[in-house]
Amino acid sequence: MAKTDIGPQTVLYPLPTALVSCEDVAGRRSIITISWTGICCSTPPMLCIGVRKSRFSHFIISSSRKFGLNLPTEDQVQIMDFCGNNSGRDIDKFSECHLTPVSGSKSGALLIAECPVSLECEVRHILELGSHDLFVAEITATYIDESVVDGGGKYIMEKLKPIAYMTKSREYRGGFSKSLGRYGEYKDHFK
Ligand SMILES: Cc1cc2nc3c(=O)[nH]c(=O)nc-3n(C[C@H](O)[C@H](O)[C@H](O)COP(=O)(O)O)c2cc1C
């Protein structure tokens, strides 16, 4: 392939989309759409989110040191885009989007009832990177709606319907039901 260097750019795709819910002791709350996120440790289970310093949610999470990371389905794409283009400084996104706030059982972190998967997270490290700070958080509980898991405990992708974000085209993509194989299926393929 004849590739051209286009300079340092944040090209990585597809990115997940998550709705991060948070609340501080004064009851200020928000939901921020986050694509700069990933699992970063297995034991203890940890994830990280990159949050721009100017976000209202940055202010809340910096003091509360806890949040919920909720996974939206394709049917919630409007909510996901809305929460990513409006600040909790100006509106209450829970009431605007008709979402139900619930408290996690471990730290009381705010979660969104309507998302099929919610991870309760407690911040362990904050790394200042530049425009964004990286919040590295331990996943202290995982809440999954029964309807998205089959009898054997496997996630049903057709029900989870995750939304991917394509950074450069700024487009949302869905349709992840096509399986390309299982972990380790090709480990001897080229031997
Ligand atoms: C698809 C998508 C992904 C986004 N990812 C991030 C992200 O990873 N980090 C971030 O700081 N902002 C991200 N944003 C922007 C915030 O969600 C947006 O500025 C939001 O309005 C902030 O809300 P708040 O001020 O209530 O915290 C994203 C927006 C969209 C639409």
Image (cartoon, rainbow, N blue to C red):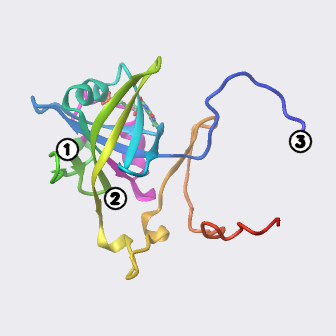
CA neighbours of label 2 inside 10 A, class few (<14), some (14 to 19), many (20+): many
Amino acid on which disc 1 is placed: Ala
Q: Position of residue 131 (x, y in %)?
A: 46, 18
SS of the residue under disc 3: loop
User: How far apart are the alpha carbons under marks 2 and 1?
Assistant: 14 Å
For label 3, the residue is: 1
> On the picture, is 84 further left or further right than 187?
left
Give whichever of discs 2 and 1 has the lower sequence position: 1
SS of the residue under disc 1: loop
* Residue that extends furthest to the bottom in the rendered view of this protein: 151
**Is residue 127 on the magenta stretch?**
no
SS of the residue under disc 2: strand
In the image, is residue 128 above or below residue 49? Answer: above
Q: Which mark is residue 109?
A: 1
Residue occupying image coordinates x 79% and y 26%: 5
- Image quarter of residue 11: top right
Q: Position of residue 180 (x, y in %)?
A: 66, 67
Give whichever of 152, 86 is nearer the camera: 152
Q: Quadrant of ligand 1?
A: top left
**Residue stretch in magenta:** 69-93
Asked whether disc 1 touches disc 3, contact meaning CB atoms under 8 Å apart, the reply is: no
Asked whether disc 2 touches disc 1, contact meaning CB atoms under 8 Å apart, the reply is: no
> On the picture, is 186 further left or further right than 126?
right
- Image quarter of residue 175: bottom right
CA neighbours of label 3 inside 10 A, class few (<14), some (14 to 19), many (20+): few
Q: Which mark is residue 117?
A: 2
Quarter of the image with the C terminus in it:
bottom right
